[in-house]
């Protein structure tokens, strides 16, 4: 019963945090498709152009929903506007989840890097395993069952669908972006631990 009571919808800050994480990874994916770092590693040109277009479209739509003007307006108008933003972000996350397995497979080819560990260089390390060791922000294999960002955003949407009430906003006071992201990541882990255990995803 206690776990059910703790199962709240994610806060607006959580949605914005993970939207930015997705934007960051999509930016890298577009860059690698557009400028493959290894001349002897390639995928079909026609296919890569289509995938670039798809990634850029999702990147643009997510950015438009979560830019600074949108955030200021959401904060000013409170929960009503924030609820609309959260609602609009979710189908974009579902589209990202659908495409991530293919994107990850291509990135592994173009970066000549495995996704799990021993990544080939800093760019691959950040893309697959997350920045500064934040594994939940790396795309991994792109498969939800392998964890990392696919599982993270799946859990986020499940909490949104099943939650009763919304977690209040708790923005860090520091304006330092790296500190803010670290604090929000720590808060996300704390808030999601009971949910993940109830869903059988933590030992």
Image: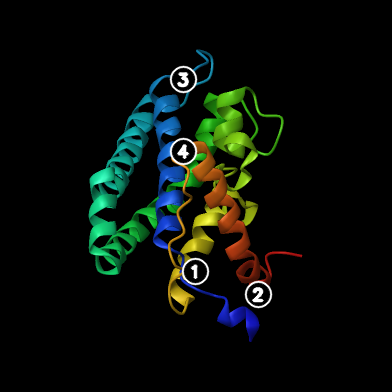
Which residue, given by chain and number where applicable, does mark 2 sit on?
Answer: 198
Disc 2 secondary structure class: helix
Question: Which is nearer the eye, 165 or 47?
Answer: 165
**Label 4 secondary element:** helix
Residue 17, percent from left and from top: 45, 50
Between 107 and 91, the one nearer to me in the picture: 91
For residue 64, side relative to residue 179 (left or right)? left
Q: Please, which colouring scheme is shown?
A: rainbow
- The numbered mark at residue 177 is 4
- Which of these two is toward me, 35 or 74? 74
In percent of width and height, residue 157 lies at 46, 64
Kind of element beneath mark 1: helix
How far apart marks 2 and 1 lie (CA) works out to 12 Å
- Which residue lies most toward the front here? 173
Residue sitting at x 47%, y 37%: 176
Q: Residues within 10 Å of mark 1 (few under 14, many from 20)?
A: some
Q: Earlier in the sequence, mark 4 or mark 3?
A: 3
Q: CA distance from mark 2 to mark 4?
A: 32 Å
Mark 1 sits on what residue? 158
Q: Earlier in the sequence, mark 2 or mark 4?
A: 4
Closer to us: mark 4 or mark 3? 4
Ranked by sequence position, the earlier of labels 4 and 1 is: 1
Marks 2/4 in contact by CB < 8 Å: the verdict is: no
| Disc 3/disc 2 C-alpha distance (Å) | 42 Å
Q: Which residue is depicted at the point 45% across and 31% down?
A: 28
Q: CA distance from mark 4 to mark 1?
A: 27 Å
Residue at x 58%, y 29% (from the top left corner): 124
Counting residues from the start of the chain, the first of labels 1 and 3 encountered is 3
Q: Which residue is mark 3?
A: 36
Q: Is 147 rendered above or below residue 194? A: above
**Crowding near the residue tagged with mark 2, few <14, some 14–19, many ≥20 C-alpha atoms within 10 Å:** few
Residue sitting at the far bottom: 1
């Amino acid at each position: 019963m206690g776990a059910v009571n703790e199962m709240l919808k994610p806060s607006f800050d959580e949605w914005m945090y993970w939207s930015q994480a997705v934007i960051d990874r999509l930016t890298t994916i577009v860059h690698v498709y557009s400028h493959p770092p290894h001349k002897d590693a390639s995928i079909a040109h026609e296919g890569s152009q289509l995938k670039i277009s798809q990634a850029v479209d999702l990147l643009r739509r997510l950015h438009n929903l979560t830019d600074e003007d949108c955030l200021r307006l959401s904060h000013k108008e409170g929960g009503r506007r924030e609820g609309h933003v959260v609602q609009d972000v979710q189908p974009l996350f579902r589209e990202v989840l659908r495409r991530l397995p293919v994107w990850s497979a291509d990135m592994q080819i173009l970066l000549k890097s495995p996704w799990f560990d021993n990544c080939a260089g800093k760019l691959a390390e950040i893309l697959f395993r997350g920045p500064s060791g934040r594994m939940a922000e790396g795309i991994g294999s792109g498969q939800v069952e392998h964890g990392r960002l696919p599982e993270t955003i799946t859990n986020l949407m499940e909490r949104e669908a099943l939650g009763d009430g919304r977690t209040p906003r708790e923005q860090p006071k520091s304006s330092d972006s790296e500190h803010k992201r670290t604090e929000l990541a720590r808060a996300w882990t704390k808030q999601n631990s009971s949910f993940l255990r109830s869903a059988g995803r933590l030992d």
